[in-house]
Image (spheres, rainbow, N blue to C red):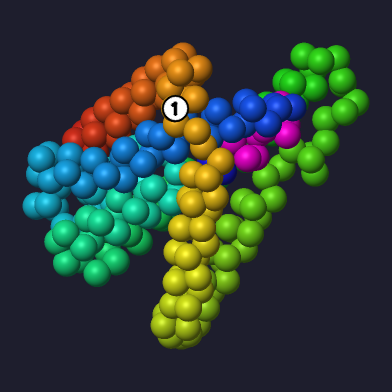
Amino acid sequence: GSAIAATAPVIDADDDEVAQAISVIFFFNVLAAILFPIFGKLLGFAQTSGTSFGIFAGTAINDTSSVTAAAATWDSMFHLGSQTLDKAVTVKLTRALAIIPITLALGYFTAKKEQRDNSFSLKRTFPAFILYFVLASLITTFALANGVNANVFLPLKELSKFMIIMAMAAIGLNSNIVKLVKSGAKPLLLGASCWAGITAVSLLLQRLMGLW
């Protein structure tokens, strides 16, 4: 969802294209939030505390809100506090940093393709929310390193969960699943293929690295 929001203005996507892209992503993410904890249990992740499933959810689920839902469910299933959630969100937000080079490259090639050589704008292309993510990470890191109690950040963590829930509800209110299924066969097939591919690569790398 963040990647779509960041790249849509860069490639001049219209509202219908954005809505369809977001609907496809969240269609599979809702399924992932429900099915991945079950899938993880079948794969034996329960025997590796929350680390392996946190990495799995953080890499194989495509939106932070759904990563949060799946990881929080895993923590609840095995009474792990927030161990899985912390790992999953860290992995997912680290992945989000890839939006920076991808968006910049898309902006550049879109300008070149449309022969707008002088229209490439770093300010227009750069995803501003990434700056806030980096800033928040630095503040938290320096605060904890200098003896600030982690409990100080608990109200903000609760607020962030509330905002994620509101974002998911807002996207749901603007998503027509019936219309998506009827008119979006190819996007759904692409989404399913990407989902399956990312899941397989995540599991393979964890196996090769001895994390699972």
- Residue 38's place in the image compared with 207, above or below, is below
* Residue 24 placement (x, y as % from top left): 46, 30
The magenta region covers 3-11
Q: Is residue 201 visible?
A: no
Which residue is painted at 81% across and 15% down in the image?
Answer: 114
Q: Is residue 143 left or right of residue 16?
A: left
Q: Is residue 40 left or right of residue 129?
A: left
Q: Quadrant of residue 13?
A: top right
For the residue pair 86 and 30, the one nearer the viewer reads as: 30
Q: Is residue 61 left or right of residue 128?
A: left
Q: Residue furthest right?
A: 118
Q: Secondary structure at mark 1?
A: helix
Tell me the residue that label 1 is attached to.
Answer: 178
Q: Quadrant of residue 158?
A: bottom left
Q: Is residue 181 magenta?
A: no
Q: Is residue 90 left or right of residue 140?
A: left
* Residue 111 placement (x, y as % from top left): 80, 22
- Residue 200's place in the image compared with 148, above or below, is above
Which residue is painted at 48% across and 25% down in the image?
Answer: 180
Instruction: Residue type at mark 1: give it.
Output: Val
